[in-house]
């Protein structure tokens, strides 16, 4: 089996104005031709910056951070796939833990007594991913356990359930073309990276679930990324693992200088 092409994906989250995005994309455009090897670079940007990212003239893919599955209508504040395609999107992030998370007591400034603001769940994630695939874009399905789930020994069960529900109804070809990001919730934005052997174990488990749901060829083709405090310092240990095919990177993707070592390591294969 030939080695899968690695993916260096930036998730800017709620960061960057259009002017900041334009500067970043100019730096990225200058960098990418100097990178040895082959990697796919994708920038998941806020909706307002997507057109700027697409106009940047680099070879990077352009990704929305979320989408609503309906084509049009009375859905105030939502974004359709047609709108994402209109501004040049090639990829869409689906089911990021920050959109599944139930904000509550530890983060009262976000939700107060509401308990939940964004509220994605396995069912909505599946509807979104199905719509992304139908539109011909590449989805990036995020899965991962919370600290409480890990401490309760529920890591594998949680992730398998997220995969089964998230991929439900998709055929093998669609899944082979989808990115799956394993992002342990407790490692996101904390500086606490998952140990590389444990990240490898879970990513191999993800591939095993795909093999069980579909077939070995699909499992061998799908790219499984790791996300959660990935940086230039820890990328090598993670990318050395046979089942980790790249990174979904938050904080360390916010400047091209910090993202560069991750891109270079992904391109090394
Ligand atoms: P950090 O790299 O900032 O931990 O964020 C990871 C993430 O959530 C990417 O989607």
Image (cartoon, rainbow, N blue to C red):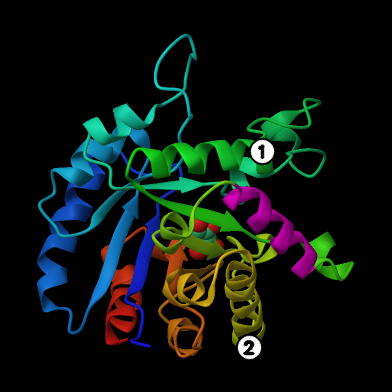
x and y percentages locating residue 188 in the rendered image: 60, 61
Which is nearer the N-term, disc 1 or disc 2? 1
Magenta range: 155-168
At mark 2, the secondary structure is helix
* Cα separation between marks 1 and 2: 31 Å
Give the farthest residue toward the right: 152
Residue 183 numbered tag: none
Q: Report whether residue 246 is seen.
A: yes
Left-right relation of 52 to 184: left
x and y percentages locating residue 262 in the rendered image: 35, 76
Q: Main secondary structure of the magenta part?
A: helix
Q: Report whether residue 145 is seen.
A: no
> Nearest the camera: 215 or 41?
215
Q: Residues within 10 Å of mark 1 (few under 14, many from 20)?
A: few
Position of the C terminus, as image quadrant, is bottom left
Q: Residue placed at 26% from the left, 35% from the top?
A: 85
Disc 1 versus disc 2: nearer the observer: 1
Q: Residue placed at 39% from the left, 39% from the top?
A: 134
Magenta stretch holds residue 58? no
Evaluate if marks 1 and 2 touch, with contact meaning CB atoms under 8 Å apart: no
Q: Does 84 appear above or below 89?
A: above
Q: Does 84 appear above or below 163?
A: above
Q: Does 160 appear above or below 269?
A: above
Q: Does 140 appear above or below 68?
A: below
Magenta stretch holds residue 164? yes
- Residue behind mark 2: 197
Q: Residue placed at 84% from the left, 61% from the top?
A: 148
Q: Residue placed at 19% from the left, 62% from the top?
A: 28
At mark 1, the secondary structure is helix
x and y percentages locating residue 239 in the rendered image: 44, 84
């Amino acid at each position: 089996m030939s080695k899968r092409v690695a993916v260096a994906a930036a998730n800017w989250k709620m960061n960057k104005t259009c002017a900041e995005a334009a500067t970043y994309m100019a730096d990225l455009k200058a960098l990418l031709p100097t990178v040895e090897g082959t990697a796919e670079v994708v920038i998941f940007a806020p909706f307002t910056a997507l057109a700027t990212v697409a106009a940047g003239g680099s070879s990077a893919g352009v990704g929305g951070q979320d989408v609503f599955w309906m084509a049009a209508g009375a859905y105030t504040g939502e974004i359709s796939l047609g709108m994402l395609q209109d501004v040049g999107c090639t990829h869409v992030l689906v089911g990021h833990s920050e959109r599944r998370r139930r904000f509550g007591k530890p983060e009262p400034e976000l939700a107060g007594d509401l308990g939940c603001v964004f509220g994605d769940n396995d069912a909505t994630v599946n509807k979104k991913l199905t719509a992304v695939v139908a539109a011909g874009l590449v989805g990036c399905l995020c899965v991962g356990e919370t600290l409480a789930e890990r401490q309760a020994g529920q890591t594998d069960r949680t992730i398998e359930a997220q995969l089964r529900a998230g991929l439900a109804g998709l055929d093998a070809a669609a899944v082979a073309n989808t990115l799956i990001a394993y992002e342990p919730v407790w490692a996101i934005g904390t500086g606490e990276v998952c140990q590389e052997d444990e990240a490898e174990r879970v990513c191999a488990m993800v591939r095993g679930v795909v093999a069980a749901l579909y077939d070995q060829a699909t499992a061998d083709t799908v790219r499984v990324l790791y996300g959660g405090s990935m940086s230039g310092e820890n990328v090598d240990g993670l990318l050395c693992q046979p089942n980790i095919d790249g990174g979904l990177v938050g904080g360390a993707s916010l400047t091209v200088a910090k993202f560069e070592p991750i891109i270079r390591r992904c391109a090394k294969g």
